[in-house]
Amino acid sequence: MRILIYGSELSAATAAAALAWVGHRVSWLPHASQPWSALREADWLRREPQLFEQIEHSRADGHLTLVDSVEAVGDLDALWLGLSPSQRKDAETLLRHPAMGSKARLVLVNNSTFPVGETERLERCLGGPHIGVALPDMLEEGRAWTTFTRPTRWLLGCDDARGERLVRELLRAFNRRSEVFQRMPRRDAELTKLAINGMLATRISYMNEIAGLADTLGVDVEHVRQGMGADTRIGFEYLYPGCGFGGPSFSRDLMRLADAQLSSGRASALLDRVMDINEQKKETLFRKLWAHFGGELAGRTIAIWGAAFKPGTVRIDQAPVLTLLEALWAQGVHVKLHDPAAIPALVEAVGERADLTVFSDDPYRACEGADALLLVTEWKTYWNPDWERLAGTLRARLILDGRNIYDPDFVASCGLCYRGIGRRADPASPGPRESLPQQAQGPGEARGKES
């Protein structure tokens, strides 16, 4: 099939590479805000496994052509939109372009996260005998190529058999192992995508609330999590407490869902609370640090492992580390931060600062001269550190685990003080370099308790 893909989002780049890979004739029109000259240098694109290499391969074999205008495109069978929510008007502008009026019967595939009902509106903008289909973006950043080429499911929103037939043909190469399409009306598919992420965010925030309660009651939240997950009505997925979630897609979907609720006259107190809890949890590690040192943070040096909003990405959009850094700097703390991939994005966001030293090679360099280590992103390189080396390096021998990836008792047996999210353990006796301070009242918490 002859396909025009419009957009510079991860969804557009992945679709362009994957559809060309299986033999479609693909023309890719990046969004004007990020043309190919800028996109090909983007760190997130080059670090996405297999993606950039496949784009280059498809360009070389002639199946993928980059274009800078719709006039450069000949006959088409499908128009694929992979745009951000803020680019809705640009989608409409493209569809109303005179060059689109000369195209034969098209299937419009809306792979963007737009408001519910937007696919129908875009179909009307295109006019004529064209068909609009909603195919909500279900990619996982850090493994986009795998989730597109070996999908577990696609939400296919279409209101007629012709639209379904064309999309099935378009994606036939990725639907051979099992039936992955869930067909439903367009509006239903658009809302389903938002509802899925709303449910996942609710589970995470609820688990974080339970972790805060576990801290207060002196309970190990891991036992609670295991007990909850063993209940077949609940399961284990997205039941891990942490120091808050981030990321562009997740956050945008929650906002789209909240907007849909508000515009329907049914404002959601639940969604508002979920988002509030998440913002509060981004301060969790700071509050634990404050409590441990009795509020005496000025002049201290703190090491942080991880800046990206999740492992496998270079992005820091709405990442917990941004909130944490602002809180630490406000207290006069010098931060030494390591991340294997997201340092360029972090420096771009916060700028060069005298109170920030960054590393992307050896994570232990960030710990040299530091009082404590805060784990923010669970990159695999952090899972099994040299505990003896950390015990000899960190002045206060304090580990704050924002993702609960370490075993508290084992960390404590290495002579370190461990504080996780709803988990804690102390060594048998204080380390010789600095005795363990008494917990003091932190911002917004009761004396002697951690949130």
Image (cartoon, rainbow, N blue to C red):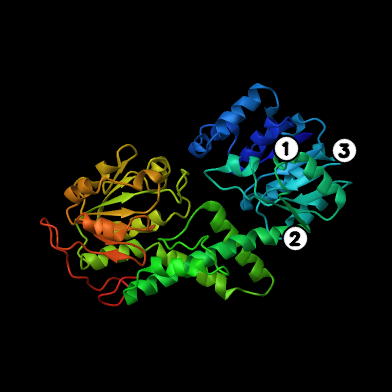
Residue sitting at x 64%, y 70%: 262
Amino acid marked by disc 2:
Arg
- The amino acid sitting under disc 1 is Ala
Q: Nearer the viewer, mark 1 or mark 2?
A: 1
Of mark 1 and mark 3, the one earlier in the sequence is: 3
Instruction: Kindly report which numbered mark, 1 or 3, lies closer to the viewer in this rendering.
Output: 1
Q: CA distance from mark 1 to mark 3?
A: 24 Å
Observer-nearest residue: 13 or 175? Answer: 175
Badge 3 is on which residue? 104
Residue at x 56% of width, y 29% of height: 53
- The residue at the point 27 percent across, 56 percent down is 410
Residue to which mark 2 is pinned: 187
Label 3 Cα neighbours within 10 Å, binned few <14 / some 14-19 / many ≥20: some
Asked if one can make out residue 277 in the rendered structure from this viewpoint, the answer is no
- In this rendering, position of residue 193 left or right of residue 420: right
Q: Position of residue 44 (x, y in %)?
A: 50, 39
Q: Which mark is residue 304?
A: none
Q: Earlier in the sequence, mark 1 or mark 2?
A: 1
Q: Is residue 257 above or below residue 120?
A: below
Q: Disc 1 designates what residue?
A: 173
Furthest toward the left, the residue is: 432
Query: Is the residue under label 2 in contact with that under label 1 (CB below 8 Å)?
Result: no
Front label number (3 vs 2)? 2
User: In the image, what residue type sits under mark 3?
Assistant: Ala
Residue 344: give x, y in percent of width and height: 41, 40
Q: Residues within 10 Å of mark 2 (few under 14, many from 20)?
A: some
Q: Is residue 153 above or below residue 76?
A: below
